[in-house]
C-alpha cells in the first residue's frame, strides 16, 4: 500500500467516524446514490449525513484539491 493510499484510507476512516455522529435521514429523502463525477456508489452514511450530496469522497477531495491550486 502506497503512502497516498494509506492517507486516503485514514481520511476515509475519520470521515466515516464524523458521519456516524450525525442523525441519519430517512432513506426516501436521499438524493444521489451514485457519484455525478465517476459513477461509483456513494456510501449510505455519506448520503445520510450530507443531504443532496452529489460526489463520492474521492471526487470531492479531488475537487477541493483543484480549487486550492487555482
Image (cartoon, grey):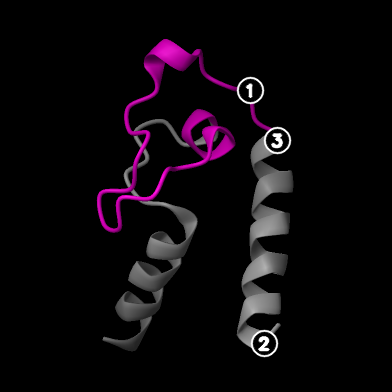
Task: Write down the residue under mark 3.
Answer: 20
Task: Return the mark for residue 2.
Answer: 2
Location of residue 13 with respect to 42 vertically, above or below: below
Residue at 33% over, 87% down? 69
Q: Identify the element where label 2 is drawn.
A: loop
Task: Write down the residue under mark 1.
Answer: 23
Instruction: Judge the density around disc 2: few (<14), some (14-19), many (≥20) Cα neighbours within 10 Å.
Output: few
Q: Earlier in the sequence, mark 1 or mark 2?
A: 2
Task: Return the mark for residue 49.
Answer: none
Residue at 33% over, 48% down? 35
Magenta-drawn stretch, dominant element (helix, strand or loop):
loop
Among the 4 quarters of the image, the one containing residue 62: bottom left
Residue at 53% over, 32% down? 44
Residue at 39% over, 23% down? 30
Question: Separation of disc 3 and disc 1 at Cα?
Answer: 8 Å
Q: Which residues are magenta?
A: 21-48
What is the x, y in percent for residue 63?
Answer: 33, 69
Amino acid at each position: 500500500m502506497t503512502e497516498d493510499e494509506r492517507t486516503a484510507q485514514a481520511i476515509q476512516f475519520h470521515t466515516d467516524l464524523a458521519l456516524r455522529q450525525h442523525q441519519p435521514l430517512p432513506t426516501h429523502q436521499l438524493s444521489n446514490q451514485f457519484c455525478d463525477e465517476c459513477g461509483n456508489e456513494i456510501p449510505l452514511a455519506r448520503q445520510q449525513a450530507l443531504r443532496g450530496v452529489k460526489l463520492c469522497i474521492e471526487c470531492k477531495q479531488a475537487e477541493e484539491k483543484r480549487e486550492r491550486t487555482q
